Amino acid sequence: MAAEQKEHKAKKEKIARQDMPEQKPDVRKRNFDEVPFGYTPELAQKEAQRCLQCKRPSCVEGCPVNINIPAFIKLIAEGKFTEAARKIKEENALPAVCGRVCPQEAQCEGNCILGAKGKDKPVAIGNLERFAADWEREHKEVTVPQIKDATHKRVAVVGSGPAGLTVAGELRKFGHEVTVFEALHKSGGVLVYGIPEFRLPKSIVQSEVDYLSKMGIKIVNNYIVGNTRTVDELFADGYDAIFVGSGAGAPMFLNIPGENLNGVFSANEYLTRSNLMKAYKFPEYDTPIIKGKRVATIGGGNVAMDSARTALRLGADESYIVYRRSMNELPARIAEVHHAEQEGINFKILTLPTRIIGDENGFVKGIECQKMELGEPDESGRRRPVPVKGSEFILDVDTVVVAIGNTPNPLIPSTTPDIKTTKYGTIIAEEGSGLTTKSKVFAGGDVVTGAATVILAMGAGKKAAKAIDDMLKS
Amino acid sequence: MAKIVKRKDLAAEVVLMELEAPEIAKKRKPGQFIILRVNEQGERIPLTIADSDPDAGTITIIFQVVGKTTMQLRDLHEGDKIADLAGPLGTATHIKNFGTAVAIGGGVGTAVIYPIAKGLKEAGNNLISIIGARTKNLLILTDEMEKISNRLIVATDDGSFGVNGFVTDVLKQIIDEGIKPDIIYAIGPLPMMKAVANATRPLGIKTIVSLNPIMIDGTGMCGGCRVTVNNQTKFACVDGPEFDAHQVDFDNLGQRLKVYNHQEKESCKIFG
Ligand SMILES: Cc1cc2nc3c(=O)[nH]c(=O)nc-3n(C[C@H](O)[C@H](O)[C@H](O)COP(=O)(O)OP(=O)(O)OC[C@H]3O[C@@H](n4cnc5c(N)ncnc54)[C@H](O)[C@@H]3O)c2cc1C
Ligand SMILES: Cc1cc2nc3c(=O)[nH]c(=O)nc-3n(C[C@H](O)[C@H](O)[C@H](O)COP(=O)(O)OP(=O)(O)OC[C@H]3O[C@@H](n4cnc5c(N)ncnc54)[C@H](O)[C@@H]3O)c2cc1C
Ligand code: SF4
Ligand code: SF4
Ligand code: FES
């Protein structure tokens, strides 16, 4: 018996982590189609069999919304794909999104026991989550959840990003009347304007938004809370609670000379033109973009990877990432860095841009950079980059994308003075409930944490929904 | 979706439209604008709210046909709908009784200055308005401006109507007459605004201009509308569109407006 168990285990370990089939790098770097094709049912089941079904699964602790990971993986192993998706949805309403964009290596997969031993790779939890969610959607198995009896309480949700969508879905299930106000003409927040099609197809985001509409949630686009109507005016209109999920959408610049030259974009502008406005389909779509031949993206996070890879797809011959620290410090998801390297993105690490140079017509013709070396660790524990004297050089580029971070848009706090913010401009909200300094106003997602992740925004939305429901019931 | 309830040609390639937008009509103040998108493939473009009727729930826009989006808009009829309309955007004009105020409108800039001039008049200012255009049949809103101004002077570059010359010439004239403006608002083509700024700077007369950089979202999200004012970067959609004329870097703005010239021409050519 013992021997048999051992043999069984040994057999399990023999299955290697299953990669998702994907488009070849030289092909995909010239199109906007999604890079991985996803698992086939066979691959998914094979990968699912790698899971040890741990009694105390450490992976679950690594997931910010504590999805019952072994349970959904077991269902996949058994071929019960739709059931697997429903199991995930008990904790996470957007699995098709999270399976694609979560930094799994730092969360669920980073905690998987298989990877911890060092010899093997963790179970591909993200890929499996994506598979289950795609299966359910593509096989039209998605069903609208049970909605509790109408409470006749009205909640306004500001912003249709992951935080807002989550709050709206949860509150609707509790029987409240929910209206989502979104500034842009399309819903989804960063999922629609920021993250590119090749990483997260917009049809998936749209189907999530449609799902909320089917649940009876009203979504009003082109409605800028603070401008079209203020928070106080919404209360006057009869809302009983307001959730602010307005994200961290204001771009930061480097404040170096030449930043207002033609051909310098914030990543937000570059990605918004390409994704939201579909500039990559110009002139079929009217919004133009500069299709640079030599593009430098400044920064090292997901936003920078998305910009640099978008540049390639728009036809760049050379797309650089200019980052002042080393490869080890890149904050982007490992999968994105890996994909970027495969596609031939040129990483100029330990490099600091100091000036953007223009030609006689005001268009970019280069960036002056300085080499850096790693010095003593700073407060964050990362070794601080320090400039190397006399190492200045010019990178010959025609387009520059600045992807060094975003801060919350001040519009809502500035039109609602009793919503207090920190010195970073983030809204102050109670840990757990998301209650702000203004009564009946809750907030969550990037507007509270500063630029973070999809799953954290959703987690905050879920907690706030619970707190709002408690408040409305009392 | 927003319905076009009225459409009227004001001058050659200058069109007025009233759009159904009850919430914006209630809320908007002089100096603010909207962003619209004609259809699913369309670009988002900013246009000033020239007027509004809160009771009817409509706003008025007046635009000059310069490229594909404004051509598409021109070709729409009463009863048609445009895909998206968002606003009111931008910081409202700081209006109070300054004393003597001069409102200068050049070309379609007259449509932008009109609501501001109206606000200034209502606040009790002695309002002197100067409007200009290249030629007579490009002049717009002369009757409307006449109605709200204590004094209106019209100028055309070719002398086909009113004073023969530029609006800056008229401004110099009235200053020579001994009029001391407490504030000047100048809105029109960039060279005009720059010329006004240069004329009033040595005289120390506070001068405000409204800038028209290329925009996308209009909410401070993309930074595409950034302008250089007092050597600092500002986002025109939220920090403006009005700025102190003496601090604006007009050359930087002029250069940034040309970013997509090539693509804009291509769009127009295909549109025909
Ligand atoms: C390019 C890019 C790539 C990213 N990649 C990843 C990734 O791979 N993995 C990951 O986990 N995270 C990633 N992130 C971060 C992640 O997208 C965000 O953390 C997440 O979207 C935050 O969600 P949110 O709901 O708080 O805000 P957002 O998604 O920013 O949504 C806010 C919404 O509110 C709207 N809004 C703002 N102000 C108003 C107003 N006044 N009235 C009405 N509506 C308003 C906005 O238009 C927007 O639609 C990425 C971010 C970017 C920009
Ligand atoms: C705050 C503000 C208020 C404005 N108010 C008015 C108004 O009341 N009446 C009016 O006629 N015009 C106004 N404009 C200018 C108007 O937005 C442009 O003429 C319009 O966008 C041109 O679009 P198009 O597709 O027809 O032309 P295109 O061929 O795309 O461009 C023609 C010119 O318009 C500029 N332009 C192009 N796209 C944009 C854009 N998305 N945003 C801003 N400018 C752009 C370009 O620099 C170019 O010189 C305003 C602009 C701003 C920023
Ligand atoms: S939601 Fe994200 S962190 Fe949680 S299991 Fe899924 S992929 Fe992992
Ligand atoms: S830790 Fe890894 S092996 Fe264990 S249950 Fe979670 S996914 Fe399966
Ligand atoms: S138009 Fe995007 S920030 Fe002003």
Image: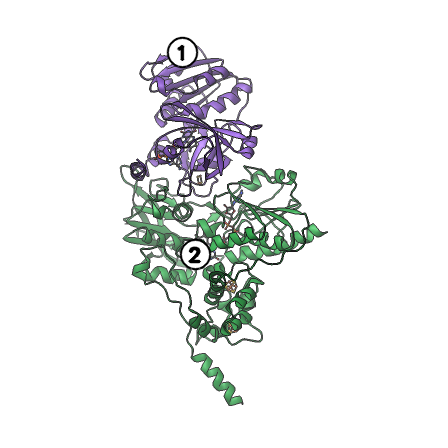
Up-down: is B131 above or below B268?
Answer: above
Of all residues shown, which one is farthest toward the right?
A474
Determine which residue is flagged by label 1.
B176
Is residue B165 something that shows in the picture? yes
Q: Residue at x 39, y 63 (%)?
A: A37
The nearer-to-camera label among 1 and 2 is 2
Give the Cα distance between marks 1 and 2. Answer: 64 Å
Q: Which residue is mark 2?
A: A200
Of residue A462 and residue A120, the one placed in the foreground of this image is A462
- Judge left or right: residue B33 versus residue A174: left
The chain drawn green is chain what? Answer: A
Quarter-of-image position of residue A166: bottom right
Residue at x 40% of width, y 69% of height: A19
Point out the residue furthest to the top here: B177
- The answer to whether mark 2 is within 8 Å of ligand 1 is no
Q: Is residue A268 above or below residue A345?
A: above
- Camera-side residue of B220 and B38: B38
Q: Position of residue A141 (x, y in %)?
A: 52, 62
Instruction: Say which chain tag 1 marks.
Output: B
Chain on which label 2 sits: A
The spot of residue B81 in percent (x, y) is 46, 36
* Disc 1 residue type (three-letter): Asp
Residue A175: % across, % down = 65, 53
Which tint was used for chain B?
Answer: purple
Q: Quadrant of ligand 2?
A: top left
The image shows residue B271, relative to residue A26, as above or below, that is above
